[in-house]
Image: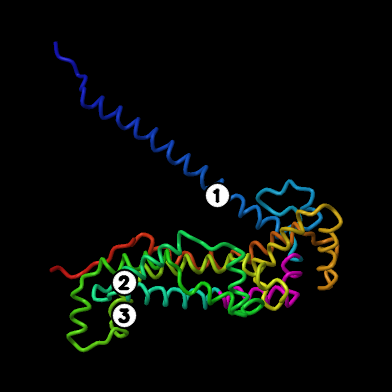
Amino acid sequence: MMTNDNPYRFAKRKSTIENFIFDAIIYITLFLVVIVTVYPFWNTIAVSFNDGLDSIKGGIRFWPRKFTLENYKTLFATDYIFRAGLVSLSRTILQTVLSVFCTAMLAYSLSRKEFVLKKLLTTILVISMYVNAGLIPGYMLIKKLHMVGSYAVYIVPCIIDVFNFILIRTYINGLPDSFVESARIDGANEMKIFLQIIMPLIVPSIAMICLFVAVGAWNSWFDTYLYCSRNKNLHSLQYVLMGYLNASQNSGGAADAGAKALAAANGSAVNQITPVSIRAAITIVASVPILIVYPFVQKYFVVGMTVGGVKE
């Protein structure tokens, strides 16, 4: 007797149900991960737009309970924040441009097969990445170079980054030698080859390293604490944020006194701002530039560390 049951149809149906359940679990997991990742930042935005005294009570989740712009008005009413933001912005741009350019130029030099000392210099650079003299010898070196309390301390020690050097050199080594050989036959010198041949080919690697260097420079505050803490004109925005973080963690009087002093200096109502609200506002202000730049560089992470070359 024949039956209408089709085992292949049953297997296909079973597979479809299993795939649906598996996809549902993945989507739910990813949704929870997104919530856990985004919620702290969104909560900080809500606190930054909330009344200071009301924020101390807690209970703010997704939306401000008492909306106000007083926190941001207080921040931007003083030249201290603008000056700190300008220091962070300028050091980020200069450090990124100089560090990436000098590191790429060094990587190109040590990637040439005809360079006799490339193995020795590469070994020295790699050893310096693994063996660090320490904080105190580093401070003594900066002091002997007369860079303590100067703007140069933000730029000069960061010109060469060994890890980025290894990435760029590996990228350059993957390029066909025919590019360089053809340029030399045409009479191009090494600088012209580097600027017009090599640099355009390693744009994905350069863009990715630029993002790493820029984020590190923008978020840096410890070097300000070590070398420029006495010079208020060289305080970075992240150092100011760290100061408010420390103030908000103090008990009672010290934190409230700092908030009252800031409010009095800017002519704001004392009862509208607190260290908690000011801290949230500075956190948002310090995070916005990176959030604006990141989408334009994100595509280079997809490109990866491979470029097309001529076939030989």
Residue range highlighted in magenta: 71-91
Magenta stretch: dominant secondary structure? helix
The alpha-carbon separation of the residues under discs 3 and 2 comes to: 17 Å
Q: Amino acid at mark 1?
A: Thr
Q: Do tag 1 and tag 2 residues touch (Cβ < 8 Å)?
A: no
Q: Residues within 10 Å of mark 3 (few under 14, many from 20)?
A: some
Corner quadrant of residue 154: bottom right
Q: Secondary structure at mark 3?
A: helix
Which residue bears the numbered disc 2? 118
Of the image marks 1 and 2, the number of the one nearer the N terminus? 1
Give the camera-side residue of 253 and 75.
Answer: 253
Q: Residues within 10 Å of mark 2 (few under 14, many from 20)?
A: some
Q: Amino acid at mark 2?
A: Lys
Residue 105 spot, x, y in % from top left: 37, 77
Which residue bears the numbered disc 3? 194
Q: Residue at x 51, y 62 (%)?
A: 132
Left or right: 68 in relation to 300: right
**Residue closest to the far bottom:** 187
Q: Secondary structure at mark 2?
A: helix
Q: Is residue 208 above or below residue 182?
A: above
**Front: mark 3 or 1:** 3
Of the image marks 3 and 2, the number of the one nearer the N terminus? 2
Residue 291 located within the stretch drawn in magenta: no
Q: Secondary structure at mark 1?
A: helix
- Quarter of the image that includes the C terminus: bottom left
**Front: mark 3 or 2:** 2
Residue 48 spot, x, y in % from top left: 70, 59
Residue 261 spot, x, y in % from top left: 84, 67
Of the image marks 3 and 1, the number of the one nearer the N terminus? 1
